[in-house]
Every structure is written in structure tokens, then in C-alpha cells.
Amino acid sequence: MEAISAAAAMSFQAVEVPTVTGDLSPESLSPSGRRHLARYVSGLGLDLAALQADMPGMRLTDSSCADERIARTTRIIELARDIGVGIVTASVGAIAHPETGEVSSLAIEGLSRIGEVADACRVRFAIRPSDSGERIVETLAAVGCPSLKVGWDPAAMVMRGINPLDAIERYAEHIALFHARDALAGCQERAGAETSLGDGEVDLVGVLDFLRSLEYGGPYILRRADGQRPVDELVAGRDRLMRELRRT
């Protein structure tokens, strides 16, 4: 709750909140608590744009934990329905085999099961993959679920050495949410790393121009996972993003 009120105080317009653990998890929010949360955020003048369902230690490609991840994700989707939030996002990492490039059948099955619940709840489940654009296209086609969307995070792709605009035209209509952050690409000597917005290798101008060409109307969500001064960097990032969005 403190982070939400801080976002309002800094004049942000929309927020995405983590809901896997803590006070905002499905297990912690009773029916009355869910109603209170919706009223509280609205009272601050904020739009609760998305719920985050990141579970980095639980991959959909891992048979030992896939069922648990699916169950926990569907509870978050039901929470989103209850509080009137239309998007749940989740990082799914690489879902293709590193050697063959084949999209994991286990991941397809898991996403299909999650998608069925999302369809029933009328909530969009926006995955944030770090595979190539071609793999994203293959995944969406294999699942074939109207509620399975993409949370486009160009920085995650850059960190894996992938051009964020690779094959974007083929899945552009599925983008439900945009994560604005920056990163340096990885190489043999070093892994990719997140940076402050504008200090990395994401072509922010090119990315925003592409979203404009789509007449994208979804949320723009700033993320900063590894910053030394995250609050200051988020404010600076917001100001930079707004300048670019006002650009003609």
C-alpha cells in the first residue's frame, strides 16, 4: 500500500502491482479487502493498470513446479476480475528449447490452461517473454487463446541479444501493455544488464514511434528492478518518457 500511495504522490497515473506474495496476494485479500483495495487506489486518483504474477523460480517449462505456478497464476487472474483489473502480467522467460528452438510443449499446455481461466474471467494474461519475436508468434499461434497477450518489454529482449523490433509486426496486435525500461545487451564477456531509461541500448524513440503507428492505447509502465536510487530514476524515467510521448 505504501508503494501505491508513493506513486500517487509522485504524480504517476497508473500502476502495476506485484501480487504473488504479501498484503496484495489473493491469499491475503478477503472479499472486503478486495473491495477496499479497489476503492483505495481509485481514491488516490490512480488507475490499477495490471497485476503482476512474476514467479522467477517457477518455470512453466519445469514439470516439477508447472502445476503450482498455473494454480497460483489463476488465483491472481481471479483476483484481477474481482477488483476490476483487466490485465495480469508475468515474465515467462525463455519458453523455447535452447538447442532445437522448439517451443516447449509443457509451456504451451500451461499457457493454455491459464488462458482458459483468463477467458472465463475476461482478463488478459500478458506474458513478458525474452525469446525472439518469431518464438512469440509461434507461442501465440500454438495456444490460440484470445486472452493470451504480450506485455512488451524491449529491455528483456535486448539483454538476451534480441532486437525488440524483430517480428514485432506479426504480434503487434497482441500487445496489451508496454514496459518502459532500458538495458545493455549481453555478450560473451558479460551478461545483459538493466540501466536507467536512456542509458542503454533500447531504441526508445523507435519503439515509441512503432507504438504510435499502431495507435496503441494501453498503459505505459515504467520498471526499474536494479537501480541504486529507484525512486529518483523512476521519476527521471517518467519525465523522459513523457517528453518522448509528447514529441510530434
Image (spheres, grey):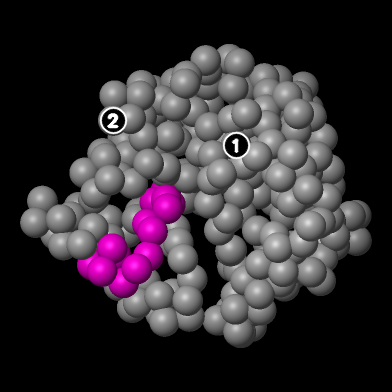
Query: Relative to 183, is 5 above or below?
Result: below
Q: Is residue 66 left or right of residue 120?
A: right
Q: Position of residue 62 (x, y in %)?
A: 51, 33
Where residue 235 sits, quadrant-wise, is: bottom right
Q: Position of residue 4 (x, y in %)?
A: 37, 71
From the viewer's side, name the closer residue of 34 and 194.
Answer: 34
From the viewer's side, name the closer residue of 63 and 135.
Answer: 135
Q: Residues within 10 Å of mark 1 (few under 14, many from 20)?
A: many
Amino acid carrying label 2: it is: Cys
Q: Quadrant of the C terminus?
A: bottom right
- Please give the residue where the numbered disc 2 appears in the rendered image: 121
Residue 173 appearing in the image: yes
Q: Quadrant of the N terminus?
A: bottom left
Tell me what residue is drawn at x 60 percent, y 84 percent.
232
Tell me what residue is drawn at x 54 percent, y 39 percent.
176
Q: Which mark is residue 175?
A: 1
Where residue 221 sits, quadrant-wise, is: bottom right
Marked residue nearer the N-terminal end (2 or 1): 2
| Whole-number angstrom distance, CA of label 2 to CA of label 1 | 19 Å
Query: Relative to 226, is 169 above or below?
Result: above
Residue 23 appearing in the image: no
From the viewer's side, name the closer residue of 113 and 149.
Answer: 149
> Circle 2 sits in a helix, a strand or a loop, which is it?
helix
Magenta span: 40-53
